[in-house]
Image: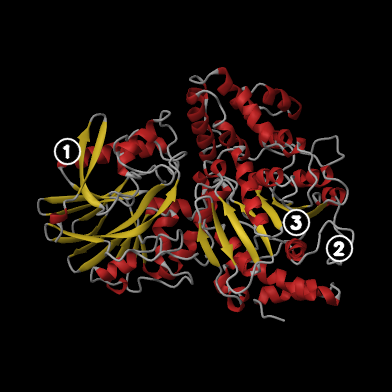
Amino acid sequence: MVRASRIGRFLLALTLAALPGCARLIGGEAGVVLEAIEHGPARTELGRITPPPLRTRLPEADLWLPRDAAPRAAVVLAPGFSEAGRDDPRLLPVAESLARAGFAVRVPELPGARRLTLDPADIAAMRRAAEVERAAGRRVALAGISFAAAPALLAGQDGTASLIVTLGGFHDMTALAVFAATGAHRAPGETAWRRGAPNPFAGPAFLLAIAEAMPDPGDRWLLREAGARRLRAPAAPLDDLARDMTPAGRAALALIAERDPARIPDRLAALPAPARSVLAALDPAGAGLVTCTLAIHGLEDPIIPWTQSAALAAALPPGRAVLVPVPGFGHVEPAAVPMDGQLALIRAMRHLLAWRDGHDPCGSAYRVLAIRQPSPHDAASMGRRRGPGMNRRVVMLGAAALSLPALMRATPAPAQAPAPVPPPATPGFFRFRLGEVTVTTLFDGFFQRPLAGLIRNAPPGAAEQAAAAAFLGTDPLRIPYSVTMLQVAGQTILFDAGTGGQLAPTGGWAIPNMRAAGLTPEQVTLVVHSHFHPDHISGLTTRDNAAVFPNAEIAVPEAEWRFWTDAGSISRLPEGLRGIATAVERRFGPYRARLRQFGDGAELAPGVRAILAAGHTPGHSVFEVTSGQAGMLVLGDTTNRPELFARNPGWHAIFDMDPQAAEANRRRLLDRAATDRLWVTGYHFPFPIAGRIAREGDGFRYVRADWIDGA
């Protein structure tokens, strides 16, 4: 038997003790695959015994194939609601682990999911991906997580797929709206509502999901703003937005404000016809489902209740559903999973592996499991009990935070990066003198996302026009990563740590470019952080969480540290953002003895002063560098791409936690840079990352440094 982790061995031994001898191998493999999904294959037994899979980037999908053997079956894996889409770092270990386990894994580009909205086009994209795999002669399973379960279910009813896998999915759009607005739900066969307080983030998430289906452009961005505002502060007033909406837009607000479950159908009927059409097109309840479905659902799910998977199982013909309720498991990040929850996850994975090997989980001859499968009524009874918790590392069959908008993005768990792209042969650094200070900017790579959905409040078509004027792509839009270094008064200072190659395959180039510039991580004496988003702190440590800058002191904004280390603040955040707190603890852990906090106006080194510029995050800070008559602002995330946000300083990026404060600070800092003719660098600025700011019309223009300014 292959060797697993200590926890893995304990779980496997407990599971296998109940199994007949012929099922021991399948049970053991399930534990090994789950361990790889949880920790990233490189750190696990699966990574030791299998070579890395082949990943091919295609325009319409990513294809992962086993390197050492032909695939035994194919899984079309739907990305959930995430702006990163198929590049979401939480999805990658799932695809890689399944490919190592003998699957061909196709991850299609879903236009709606990437735009964080419900879009029937996602069904067609899933169906096309399934047809490609079927044409290759492979048996096909379609898998969907959370809201993406609907495209998987609806695309898989034409006979192309022989298995559907859903994790935290839903069956009935009306019931989903009832739960989002009121917190009420019920299991199959029940007439009385199970009552609970509505989750403060379920209603806003539902609002964001339907906003793009509104016919009026003004309603679309007002509803997106309303959803984003309520995600930041569940009790935030919306009256100012409602005043500018059409009656159709106000009908959407009335839907999430309704607290009577019996009135939700009327609220849905009051939505404009295009919105009702989208909801109907993505509603599995009216689809005549027949394909064998493996429905996995956490009994602690606060966004989509477990009763929805129970209803899905009950709606399928007899024998066509395998329902796996998971005690202790939530929607995005599980609570302490009790032993029966851990065993349920292993059971679910064993079903998938048995299907890979030619068994039909819904067939009458299927006898892989020794434990009887629960019925929907079993699930109903399980939902009323709570097993003892167990302090353990998270076991997840899927990508964390895929169901919520990227506004709430979590930091990914450490995972093996897929096929990292090497940095360009031309070194990506730029050096110039600022008085007596030497400034070196380092290109760390880039990530890609659609322009659609990046800006909350841009008038229709304006973002596309601005991108075209700057010769930027829109699908994808490339957003750079970069860091700034100073050599001043005998110190070597680094502003932000970069991605460390742990977020996007086209990232992690800062250290190679640092070495190309004649500097090393060992020479860095101070790392100063603007804020704690994952793309700024992941480069502090390696994948194994070893310190990258062994001789550096770490300086962090005290307001940022206070927010992300306060349990009360974190508990009020959407689940998808809570992972940042975990990342803060992990990334800064090796440096705790060398970490200090600074406030607004603090001098961090001779001529280097901190300026609090909150809005993007609660403690976001920028840094003023002066030497003689020369000055520079290290702007951090004051703007995203300056071609868009400097030119239009009133635009609000979806990543800003307080857009109004972010806008006020953006205008203030850009105005000062233009007035005082200061140098500027920015984390998401294009190479050479340094330049100046000039006024232009109602906004500003970023003027890149002249190459001959370089030292």
Q: Quadrant of residue 710?
A: bottom left
Q: Position of residue 112 (x, y in %)?
A: 56, 40
* Image marks 3 and 2: residues in contact by CB distance under 8 Å: no
Q: Which residue is mark 2?
A: 366
Q: Quadrant of the N terminus?
A: bottom right
Foreground label between 3 and 2: 2
Position of residue 602 measured from the top left corner of the image (x, y, whole percent): 27, 54
Q: Residues under labels 2 and 1: Cα distance?
A: 75 Å
Q: Amino acid at mark 1?
A: Thr
Quick check: 191 above or below 492? above
Callout in the foreground (2, 1): 2
- Identify the residue position indicated by label 1 in the image: 675
Residue at the image point whose x is 69% and y is 32% from the top: 280
Instruction: Residue 167: give x, y in percent of width and height.
Output: 69, 52
Which numbered marker is on residue 327? 3
Please name the residue shown 23% across and 71% down the image: 518
